[in-house]
Image (spheres, rainbow, N blue to C red):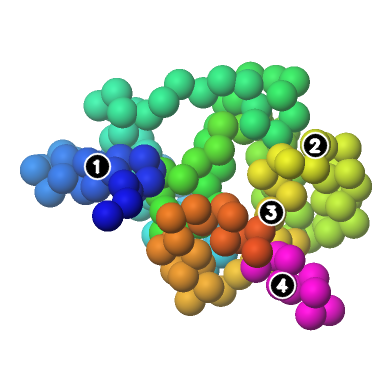
């Protein structure tokens, strides 16, 4: 039997903390738009779980941005919301670029050209994936490798 990925272990710990009565933090903004198959409300719930992990000291420290390596990571980016703790440390600027890629694929491609070819952002699809696809990816032990294979399959079928 293989070990569970660290992010899934953390997710189960937070689920247990919530089940033991920890209150969910209040979300004070409008419900966000759907993203890669997750509803806005599901995105809020992931944010709440992340906040609890911070509160109880289970979130790792952020370091340099995992995209540009030039700035301090101020955010975490989650591509697959069905894996709430499969997160990448990311600066504000790069995080905005990741989320804007759907509306500006040419700018996204130009941005990727300036990054190391092994950077995780090269696995991101230029368009959103549906709910079923996101849920399937979330069940993969290495969701990022599975996402990269999906991107390669789509590119091969164009």
In primary-sequence order, the first of circles 2 and 1 is 1
Residue 152: x percent and y percent?
A: 73, 66
121 in relation to 131, above or below: above
Q: Name the one closer to the observer, 123 or 96.
A: 123
Residue 114 in the figure: left or right of residue 151: right
Q: Residue, x 12% and y 48% (percent of image)?
A: 19
Residue topped by disc 3 = 123
Residue 27, quarter of picture: top left
Would residue 14 be seen by someone viewing this image from the given angle? yes
Residue topped by disc 2 = 116
Mark 3 or 4, closer to the camera: 4
Residue 13, quarter of picture: top left
Which secondary structure lies at badge 1?
A: helix
104 in relation to 119, above or below: below
Q: Mark 4 Cα within 10 Å, few/some/many (few <14, many 20+)?
A: few
Q: Mark 3 Cα within 10 Å, few/some/many (few <14, many 20+)?
A: some
Magenta stretch containing residue 153, yes or no? yes
Q: Name the one closer to the observer, 73 or 122.
A: 122
Would residue 131 be seen by someone viewing this image from the given angle? no
147 in relation to 86, above or below: below
Residue 44: x percent and y percent?
A: 40, 52
Q: Which mark is residue 153?
A: 4
């Amino acid at each position: 039997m293989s070990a569970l990925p660290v992010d899934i272990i953390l997710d189960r710990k937070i689920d247990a903390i919530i089940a033991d009565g920890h209150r969910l933090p209040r979300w004070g903004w409008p419900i966000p738009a759907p993203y890669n198959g997750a509803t806005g409300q599901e995105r809020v719930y992931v944010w709440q779980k992340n906040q609890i992990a911070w509160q109880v000291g289970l979130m790792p420290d952020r370091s340099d941005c995992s995209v540009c390596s030039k700035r301090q990571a101020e955010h975490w980016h989650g591509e697959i919301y069905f894996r709430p703790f499969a997160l990448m440390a990311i600066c504000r600027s790069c995080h905005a670029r990741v989320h804007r890629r759907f509306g500006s694929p040419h700018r996204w491609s130009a941005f990727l050209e300036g990054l190391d070819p092994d950077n995780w952002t090269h696995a991101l699809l230029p368009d959103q994936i549906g709910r079923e696809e996101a849920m399937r990816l979330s069940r993969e032990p290495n969701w990022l490798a599975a996402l990269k294979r999906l991107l390669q399959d789509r590119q091969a079928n164009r």
